[in-house]
């Protein structure tokens, strides 16, 4: 598979200034491949209007040499869809480095928003120290509906029995602020009374599809030693299935009550169980990090809805993935992409570039599918049979 076909290539510039260390990382995601000249032209002068902004020279590297070729041949060595810049910006008063909030404000500034729109790109800002901290394996938690999978499960349940319009009306009321998440969930679940319990097998076999890149992202994270979880406002039968299918470590979701005959949903959430809403998701993130002895700095939370925002802000890095507009505005970071695998780019260049002393840190293009395949081989205990895996074993 060529780099162009794979669609997850990365160009990243990792040389820092000899005078001042960088304090922010900017990843520019493009919908199309761009070559060296195009990237340079695109980024030239864009940050000049920001007081105190300083960057080093940027560029991409030709991967024809053997040192940089250890992840496999790249057919377009000087092209990619993601461009990385290390830079230095002024921090807010009283701070040595910008916070994630500072980065969010910069992302939402008039100049950056105008640049994103004009160039059809999207920028993700992170404090440099946070970016580097993700080199340490941590905890990654994900929403399920419209994040790990492409559907909204409650809509599919309602549609299966001809009650979609009733459920959609409740959803709209919640979006208008007339109902909170718990009230809206209970009201929607009430419309599911009588849905046969075998509906779950039908959904698994015929309806539910995983978001592109979900399987590969989890494979990479697990190979790197990360703990993973799905924290869903949906329902346990599918959340547990998603956990087992993707190989996640944990799954939490709402439990539905079954009628006395055991053949249909009762239209109620199981009495005595907590609704997995915004505050519960946040609490679960904190509890899992504590149980796994993982610093909250080394956590990421990914979701698309307003009930994911609390856990996004509690995590070391919260990412709104293909989220509703208001969620994107409120989230610490955002990513609109056809593949979840792009999230690995947002963690740290060490996961996509070589760190061996023999391989200088520099701009780099990655065929991500090849990286996933090689990580999978390494994870199968074949390290001694593949020199590439030996290098990656030291790296990860």
Image (tube, rainbow, N blue to C red):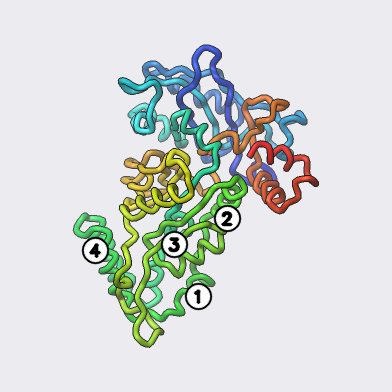
Local packing at callout 1 (Cα closer than 10 Å; few below 14, some 14-19, many 20+) is few
Residue 10 in view, yes or no? yes
Q: CA distance from mark 3 to mark 1?
A: 15 Å
Q: How far apart in space, not on screen, are marks 2 and 3 (Cα)?
A: 16 Å
Would residue 67 be found to the left or right of residue 23 on screen?
Answer: right
Q: Secondary structure at mark 2?
A: helix
10 Å crowding of disc 3: few (<14), some (14-19), many (20+): some
What number is the disc on residue 215? 2
Dividing the picture into quadrants, the one containing residue 358 is top right
Closest to the observer: 223 or 31?
A: 223
Q: Measured from the top left, where is residue 276 in percent x and y? A: 34, 60
Q: Which residue is mark 3?
A: 151
Residue 183: which numbered mark, if any?
Answer: 4
Q: Is residue 3 above or below residue 53?
A: below
Where is residue 47 shown, x and y percent of the image? 43, 21
User: What secondary structure is marked by label 3?
Assistant: loop
- Pointer 2: residues within 10 angstroms few (<14), some, or many (20+)? some
According to the picture, the residue beneath numbered tag 1 turns out to be: 201
Compare marks 3 and 1 and give the one earlier in the sequence: 3
Say which element carries label 4: helix
Q: Nearer the viewer, residue 86 or 250?
A: 250
Say whether marks 2 and 4 touch (CB < 8 Å): no
Q: CA distance from mark 1 to mark 2?
A: 20 Å
Q: Give whichever of discs 1 and 4 has the lower sequence position.
A: 4
* Relative horizontal placement of residue 241, taking residue 165 as reference (left or right): right
Residue 258 in the image, given as x and y percentages of width and height: 36, 79
Query: How far apart, in angstroms, are the residues tagged by discs 2 and 4?
Result: 33 Å
Quarter occupied by residue 118: top left
Q: Nearer the viewer, mark 4 or mark 3?
A: 4
Name the quadrant of the C terminus: top right
Q: Tell me whether the residue at label 3 lies in contact with that at label 1, contact meaning CB atoms closer than 8 angstroms.
A: no
């Amino acid at each position: 598979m060529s780099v162009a076909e794979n669609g997850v290539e990365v160009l990243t510039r990792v040389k820092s200034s000899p005078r001042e260390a960088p304090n922010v990382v900017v990843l520019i995601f493009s919908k199309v491949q761009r070559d060296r000249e195009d990237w340079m032209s695109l980024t030239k002068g864009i940050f000049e209007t920001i007081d105190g902004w300083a960057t080093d020279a940027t560029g991409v590297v030709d991967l024809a040499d053997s040192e940089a070729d250890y992840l496999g041949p790249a057919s377009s060595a000087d092209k990619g869809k993601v461009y990385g810049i290390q830079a230095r910006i002024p921090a807010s008063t009283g701070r040595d480095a910008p916070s994630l909030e500072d980065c969010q404000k910069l992302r939402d500034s008039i100049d950056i928003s105008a640049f994103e729109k004009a160039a059809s790109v999207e920028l993700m800002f992170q404090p440099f120290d946070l970016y580097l901290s993700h080199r340490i394996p941590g905890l990654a938690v994900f929403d399920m509906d419209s994040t790990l999978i492409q559907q909204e499960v409650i809509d599919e349940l309602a549609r299966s029995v001809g009650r979609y319009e009733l459920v959609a009306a409740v959803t709209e009321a919640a979006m208008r602020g007339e109902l909170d998440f718990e009230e809206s969930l209970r009201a929607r679940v009430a419309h599911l009374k009588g849905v046969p319990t075998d509906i779950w097998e039908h959904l698994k076999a015929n309806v539910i599809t995983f978001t592109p890149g979900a399987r590969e992202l989890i494979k990479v994270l697990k190979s790197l030693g990360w703990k993973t979880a799905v924290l869903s406002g949906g329902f346990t039968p599918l959340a547990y299935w998603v956990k087992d299918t993707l190989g996640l470590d944990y799954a939490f979701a709402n439990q539905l009550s079954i009628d006395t005959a055991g053949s249909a949903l009762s239209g109620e959430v199981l009495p005595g169980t907590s609704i997995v809403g915004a505050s519960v998701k946040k609490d679960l993130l904190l509890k899992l990090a504590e149980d796994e002895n993982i610093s909250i700095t080394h956590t990421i939370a990914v979701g698309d809805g307003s009930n994911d925002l609390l856990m996004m802000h509690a995590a070391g890095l919260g990412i709104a993935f293909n989220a509703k507009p208001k969620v994107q505005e409120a989230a610490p970071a955002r990513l609109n992409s056809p593949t979840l695998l792009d999230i690995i780019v947002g963690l740290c260049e060490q996961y996509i570039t070589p760190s061996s002393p023999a391989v200088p840190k520099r701009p780099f293009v990655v065929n991500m599918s090849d990286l996933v395949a090689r990580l999978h081989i390494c994870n199968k205990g074949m390290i001694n049979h593949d020199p590439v895996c030996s290098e990656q074993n030291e790296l990860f």
